[in-house]
Amino acid sequence: MTPDSAPRTYSISELSRMFEVTPRTIRFYEQEGLLEPQRRGQTRIYHDKDRVRLKLTLRGKRLGFSLAEIREVIELYDALPDGNARQLRRLLELLAEKRANLQRQEEDIRLMRKELDDVEGRCREALLALAENAEG
């Protein structure tokens, strides 16, 4: 491979800027086994695979996935030869689980709002009754 065709590498600071996270966050994901940079002495050298893994990890966290779930999807992707299809099927399962959880939470919130409205209404009625009794 000529120097011009060498694969793109990234420093921890480049990835930090690219994804707007701290180097500490990246080191944490490395400790968790989600990133596997090369080492040259104390320097970490990240490859495109690490950049993609970091992107998937951050997206997974935004969607509410646990690190264990993210790791599972990444490991499925790394498994050959059908890792990609298996990863996508598992990701669909996880998305369905998250959607079901969100629907349950929405229902819980709706019920809690109704309960708050009921309590608020009773409080307002009690205040009105107290004010009327004080006047009368």
Image (cartoon, helix red, strand yellow):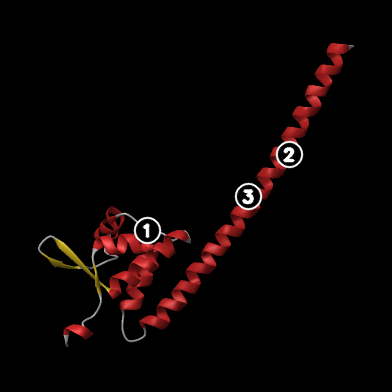
At x 23%, y 65%, the residue is 11
At x 44%, y 74%, the residue is 90
Q: From the viewer's perspective, is 99 left or right of 70?
A: right
**Which residue in the structure is indicated by mark 2?**
117
Disc 1 secondary structure class: loop
Depth order, front residue of 45/130 = 45
Q: Amino acid at mark 3?
A: Asp
Report the residue that reaches farthest toward the right: 136
Disc 2 secondary structure class: helix
- In which quadrant of the rendered view does residue 28 lie? bottom left
Judge the density around disc 2: few (<14), some (14-19), many (≥20) Cα neighbours within 10 Å.
few
At x 68%, y 47%, the residue is 111
Q: Please tell me which of labels 3 and 1 falls first in the chain.
A: 1
Q: Which mark is residue 20?
A: 1
Give me the C-alpha separation between circle 1 and circle 2: 41 Å
**Which residue in the structure is indicated by mark 3?**
108
In the image, is residue 69 above or below residue 84? above
Q: Where is residue 79 drawn, in percent x and y? A: 31, 79
Report the residue that reaches farthest toward the front: 4
Q: Please tell me which of labels 3 and 2 falls first in the chain.
A: 3
Give me the C-alpha separation between circle 3 and circle 1: 33 Å
The quarter of the picture where the C terminus appears is: top right
In the image, is residue 93 above or below residue 65? below
Q: Where is residue 119 drawn, in percent x and y? A: 72, 34
Q: Where is residue 117 drawn, in percent x and y? A: 73, 39
Q: Please tell me which of labels 1 and 2 falls first in the chain.
A: 1
Report the residue that reaches farthest toward the left: 41
Q: Answer whether labels 3 and 2 touch (C-beta < 8 Å).
A: no
The quarter of the picture where the N terminus appears is: bottom left
Q: Amino acid at mark 1?
A: Glu
Judge the density around disc 1: few (<14), some (14-19), many (≥20) Cα neighbours within 10 Å.
few
Q: From the viewer's perspective, is 99 left or right of 13?
A: right
